[in-house]
Amino acid sequence: MSEILMVYTRGNHVENIHRGDIVAVDCSGKILSEIGNARLPMFWRSAAKPFQALPFVKSGGLEKYGITDEELAILVSSHSGEEFHVELVRGILKKLGLTEEALDCGAIRPMSGKAYKKILQAGEKPQQVHNPCSGKHTQILALALMNGIPIKDYTNPKHPAQKLIFEHVAMASSVPEDRLDIGIDGCGVPVFYLPIYNMSLAYARLSSPHLGDWGEYESAAKKIRDAMSKYPKILSGTGRVDEAVSEITHGRIIAKCGADAVYCIAVKDANLGITFKIEDGSYQATTPMVIGVLKWLDLLTRDEAHELDEKFPPLLRNIRGDVIGTIEMKF
């Protein structure tokens, strides 16, 4: 059963309560720490993106299309739709011989408020490239092209590219294919339903590919991990906690968000993967939770913790900027 992880106070009273579950796992599958239900089944959402890219990277897609490390980071990103994100996606599409019209992720306002303001000031509307999942969709298109598969209906779960991705997600998370269920994600492609324990196991294997029993996929896992570690601003966006955690720890900690408050963390070369899910799906609550989880597991130095607290103080402010409450971890 999910447990109380965090409370928001106003004055001297608790106003909001967030329940959830946390599990930390090593490459052997040993549970190192847990709160709540480590076997809670949940949709992986965008935190699955590194593993959706495995068949493309393993099959030589980076080399075939001249994909750089920065571009690999955008392929597994949940980006904020800033100009540099958009240009990276457009650049990859050009390498594939495709235009933005090939994307089927849906047009949506970028996650970055500043980027959205620029679009409006230019008298334009958000496009599909501004979608935080446009990198993932570009990667799926590339996977289809390199395998000679028609790109029509590439979002359909029965599409051959999606079947390839399904097989690799099952392999990475150590879930038998007949026990890996799917739904449809916000961007239209299949999303995977599995225990948060297996999400953590996949991230542990990603954290330390040499220990993860990847076999012929070890090099691909390492390339994906290193791109995520090296380019956190591409992986997420300016001012987000995902970016800040990696920047402040110099790439030692890789944080990957998923929609509806599922969140995964890999600690580079430390044989450790972590997942938490906030029961009510509050995206706002994920920022303090990431910092709280890292402190709970003693994964930050004193200076790193202080810098994160400076960037994301655990305080509740009103519209005027007055401090009117606190954000408190309960674990």
Image: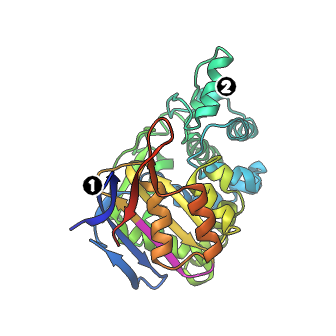
Q: Which residues are magenta?
A: 269-275
Q: Measured from the top left, where is residue 292 in percent x and y?
A: 46, 67
Frontmost of labels 1 and 2 is: 1
- Numbered disc 1: secondary structure: strand
Residue 219 image label? none
Tell me, yes or no, if residue 111 can be seen here: yes
Say which label, 1 or 2, has the lower sequence index.
1
- What's under tag 2, amino acid-wise? Lys
Q: Foreground: 110 or 300?
A: 300
Magenta stretch: includes residue 273: yes
Q: Measured from the top left, where is residue 156 in percent x and y?
A: 42, 40
Residue shown at 65% from the left, 48% from the top: 74
Relative side of 169 to 88, left or right: left
For label 1, count other residues whose C-alpha is less than 10 Å away and answer few (under 14), some (14-19) or many (20+).
few
Above or below for 26 versus 235:
below
Q: Which residue was labeled with disc 2? A: 118
What is the C-alpha distance between the residues marked 1 and 2?
40 Å
Splitting the image into 4 quarters, where does residue 185 fall? top left
Q: Foreground: 295 or 260?
A: 295
Residue shown at 52% from the left, 55% from the top: 49
Splitting the image into 4 quarters, where does residue 151 fall? top right
Q: Which residue was labeled with disc 1? A: 13
Residue shown at 64% from the left, 32% from the top: 115
Above or below for 292 versus 55:
below
Q: Measured from the top left, where is residue 132 in percent x and y?
A: 55, 41
Q: Measured from the top left, where is residue 315 in percent x and y?
A: 46, 54
